[in-house]
Amino acid sequence: MNKTATCELLLFVSGEAGLTLTELSSLTEMSKQACQQQIDYLKEKYHSDRESALTIIETAGKYRMATKEDFSEILKNYAKTPLNQSLSKSALEVLSIIAYKQPLTRIEIDQLRGVNSSGVLSTLRAFDLVEKVGQVEAPGRPSLYATTEFFLDYIGINNLEELPEIDESRYVAEQQTLFNESEENENQ
């Protein structure tokens, strides 16, 4: 049986879950190096074929078939993603905090935001963007939260190191300026 077609078939049927090199190697009984060569060949084949809407991507250490970015507008028109429509600014804020500071407790998130985040955390967990990853050895044993593999896949990165860097000192300075302005307005 054709090695390239076998790898292509397995990547196709694995769907959004994708396959690691180890999984692909086990399923095809080929070495990881041979599987990587087949994936590289397929990537190049799809990339150079202007009549194909497909590509192979790697996120969170897994390979999967996907559509080329050129077709994103068509896909957006075909199916509006409920996730994009239902994540509030608060949910995006909490998701960002968790992505950059994980793992952390709800109380730590609340302290950073200045408001209760229980409902937002429930929403993010329902969308499988964050999950409980443990508990703190402290009174009440609060849960620790972190992002999921689906989060990495959803935003299209392999690992958290690929997140854009943020300048926390600038953020803190902006927050302090807003606080001072608010305090001055109240005193007038």
Image: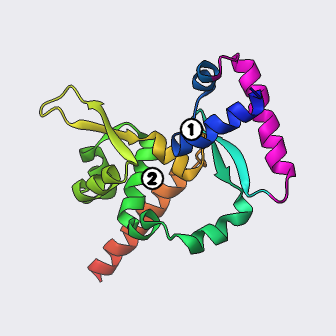
Q: In the image, residue 69 lies at what x, y percent?
A: 70, 59
The answer to whether residue 63 is seen in the rendering is: no
Magenta region: 28-51
**Residue annotated with mark 2:** 96
- Residue 37, magenta (yes or no): yes
Residue at 62% in and 43% down = 12
Q: Which residue reaches farthest front?
A: 1
The answer to whether residue 135 is seen in the rendering is: yes
Specify how the rendered protein is coloured. rainbow
Which one is closest to the eye, mark 1 or mark 2? 1
Residue 119 lies left or right of residue 150; in this view the side is left
What separation in Å lies between label 1 and label 2 (alpha carbons)?
25 Å
Label 2 element class: helix
Q: In the image, residue 74 lies at what x, y percent?
A: 65, 71
Q: Is residue 169 above or below residue 158?
A: below
The label shown at residue 18 is 1
Nearer the observer, 146 or 139: 146
Q: In the image, residue 85 lies at what x, y percent?
A: 43, 70
Q: Main secondary structure of the magenta part?
A: helix
